[in-house]
Amino acid sequence: MDRTDFLQLVLLSIIIVGQNIMAAAADKRSEDTYQDADATLHEAAEIQKHLLVQDRVLTGLTDKVAKLTEHMASLIATAKKRNRITIEGLCKDSHQHTQGVIAEKQHKSHKHPCRLA
């Protein structure tokens, strides 16, 4: 065996060891990437569940606001027919209609529109 054959064998061994080290590092990066993607997917699923619950709540609130808007429109129409469009009159009619829904404590609050006029 001459020197070039020996040198080739030694260098080939070094190259194979280097490739094994690089492959191990690539495998580690690949595993880390997979773990990150799995955690992101789990977090996205949790966020989606949370958003679905929020959508249901917001839909319920939107429906309530729509009903209240319709009720206020009918109160305004009634007040126009009676020629008494005042905040006090609307509050009185609204209170009579929604008695039992709005707590008396809230009605007596200083923030209630009837108390602002």
Image (cartoon, rainbow, N blue to C red):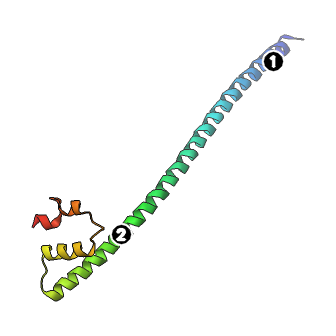
Categorize mark 1 by other alpha carbons within 10 Å: few (<14), some (14-19), many (20+).
few
Mark linked to residue 59: none
Q: In the rendering, at what x and y percent does residue 12 appear?
A: 79, 20
Amino acid type for the residue under numbered disc 2? Lys
Q: Is residue 52 above or below residue 8?
A: below
Please identify the residue farthest to the right as the structure is shown: 1
Q: In the rendering, at what x and y percent does residue 71 appear?
A: 29, 77
Kindly state the secondary structure of the residue where label 1 is placed: helix
Q: Is residue 102 left or right of residue 85?
A: right
Tell me which residue sits at (23%, 80%) in the image. 75
Amino acid type for the residue under numbered disc 1? Gln
Q: Quadrant of residue 6?
A: top right
Q: Is residue 27 above or below residue 104?
A: above
The span from disc 1 to disc 2 (Cα, nearest Å) is: 82 Å
Q: Is residue 19 left or right of residue 79?
A: right
Q: How many marks?
A: 2
Mark linked to residue 8: 1
Please identify the residue farthest to the bottom as the structure is shown: 81
Q: In the rendering, at what x and y percent does residue 10 appear?
A: 79, 15
Q: Nearer the viewer, residue 8 or 114?
A: 114
Kindly state the secondary structure of the residue where label 2 is placed: helix
Q: Nearer the viewer, residue 83 or 103?
A: 103
Quarter of the N terminus within the rendering: top right
In the picture of the structure, the residue carrying the numbered disc 2 is 64
Q: Is residue 66 above or below residue 57?
A: below
